[in-house]
Image (cartoon, rainbow, N blue to C red):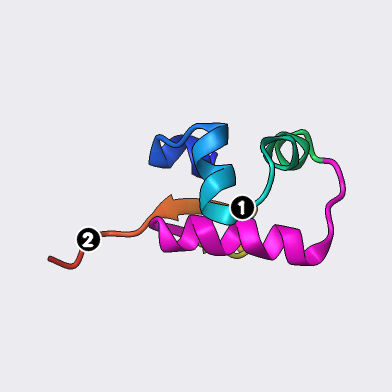
Amino acid sequence: MARAGLGLGVRELAALAEVSTNTITRLERGEALYPRTVEAIRSALEAAGVEFIPENGGGAGVRLRKDTI
C-alpha cells in the first residue's frame, strides 16, 4: 500500500532499500523477513514520504506525509 501510494515499482523500492526485488515481493506476500531487512524497507519508505500509523482500534496503516513547503 505504501509503495503504491508513492507510485513506486518493485524495482524502484528495492533500489531505495538496497534489497532484491524478490525481497520486496516476499514482504508484500506476507512472508517472514529478517528484522533488519524490514527496517531497511521501512526506512526507505519513510524517506520517500510515508508515515506509518500505529494501531488505534481501527488497525495499523500508512499515509503520505504532507509537504511542508
Q: Is residue 18 left or right of residue 28?
A: left
Residue 43 image point, x, y percent: 55, 64
Residue farthest toward the right in the current orientation of the protein: 32
Q: Is residue 62 left or right of residue 49?
A: right
Estimate the spatial distance between the alpha carbons at disc 1 and disc 2, rounded to whole Å. Answer: 25 Å
Which residues, given as a range, are shown in magenta? 31-51
Marks 1 and 2: which is nearer the front? 2
Residue 53 can be seen in this image = no
Residue 62 image point, x, y percent: 51, 52
Residue drawn where x is 74% and y is 42% of the image = 23
Residue drawn where x is 74% and y is 35% of the image = 22
**Secondary structure of the residue carrying numbered label 2:** loop
Position of residue 63 relative to residue 1, above or below, is below
Q: Quadrant of residue 34?
A: bottom right
- Number of residues whose C-alpha sits closer than 10 Å to that of mark 2, classed few (under 14), some (14–19) or many (20 or more): few
The amino acid sitting under disc 2 is Asp
Residue 34 part of the magenta-drawn span: yes
The residue wearing badge 1 is: 58
Q: What label does residue 4 carry, if any? A: none
Residue drawn where x is 76% and y is 66% of the image = 36
**Secondary structure of the residue carrying numbered label 1:** loop
Q: Nearer the viewer, residue 69 or 60?
A: 69
Residue 41 can be seen in this image = yes
The amino acid sitting under disc 1 is Gly
Position of residue 35 relative to residue 21, above or below, is below
- Number of residues whose C-alpha sits closer than 10 Å to that of mark 1, classed few (under 14), some (14–19) or many (20 or more): few
Q: Is residue 20 left or right of residue 67?
A: right
Q: Which quadrant is home to the N terminus?
A: top right
Residue farthest toward the left in the current orientation of the protein: 69
Q: Which quadrant is home to the C terminus?
A: bottom left
Residue 48 image point, x, y percent: 40, 56
